[in-house]
Image (cartoon, helix red, strand yellow):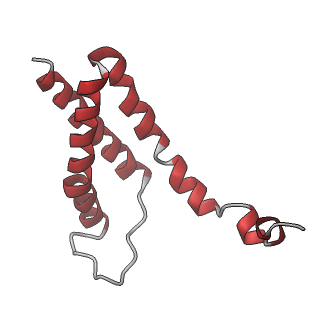
Amino acid sequence: MPSLRLTTASLAHPPRRLVQGWLSGVPFAIAGIAPGFLFGWRACFAALLLAGVASFLVYIPMTVLVLNGGVPLPEDAPAPGLTVRSYCVLLLLWMTTVWITLSLLRI
């Protein structure tokens, strides 16, 4: 008996948008693991937690405001798409937070 996943085309292959969303996080994961080899894994984990919190509370909302022309999004409006430049700025801010936190933890 064939499984439901194989008989339904939409379930057999993930949508391209889902794969692109997952792949956009790969540079963050690679860049986040790299400092662990230099500073130790405990300090790296603490820095990654702080960078994650800072990212969701500060960097991403500010990026959405900038991409939306400084106007807050209504509740039912979709979030604007990230441009390559804004993605690079988010990665740079995130990694700067990680490295600054690591340097402070190692003192």
Residue 60 picture quarter: bottom left
Residue 83 x, y percent position in the rendering: 42, 56
Name the residue located 23 percent from the left edge and 34 percent from the top edge: 47
- Side of 6 where 90 appears, left or right: left
User: Looking at the image, which is closer to me, 3 or 77?
Assistant: 3
Q: Is residue 90 above or below residue 48?
A: below
Q: Is residue 23 above or below residue 39?
A: below
User: Looking at the image, which is closer to me, 64 or 16?
Assistant: 16
Q: Is residue 72 above or below residue 26?
A: below
Count of marks, rendered view: 0
Q: Is residue 96 above or below residue 4?
A: above
Residue 11 x, y percent position in the rendering: 71, 67
- Side of 18 where 37 appears, left or right: left
Name the residue located 31 percent from the left edge and 23 percent from the top edge: 41
| Residue that extends furthest to the front in the rendered view of this protein | 1
| Residue that extends furthest to the right in the rendered view of this protein | 1
Location of the C terminus (image quadrant): top left
Residue 59 x, y percent position in the rendering: 24, 53
Residue 24 x, y percent position in the rendering: 49, 48
Location of the N terminus (image quadrant): bottom right
Residue 62 picture quarter: bottom left
- Side of 17 where 75 appears, left or right: left
Name the residue located 43 percent from the left edge and 64 percent from the top edge: 81
Name the residue located 83 percent from the left edge and 71 percent from the top edge: 7
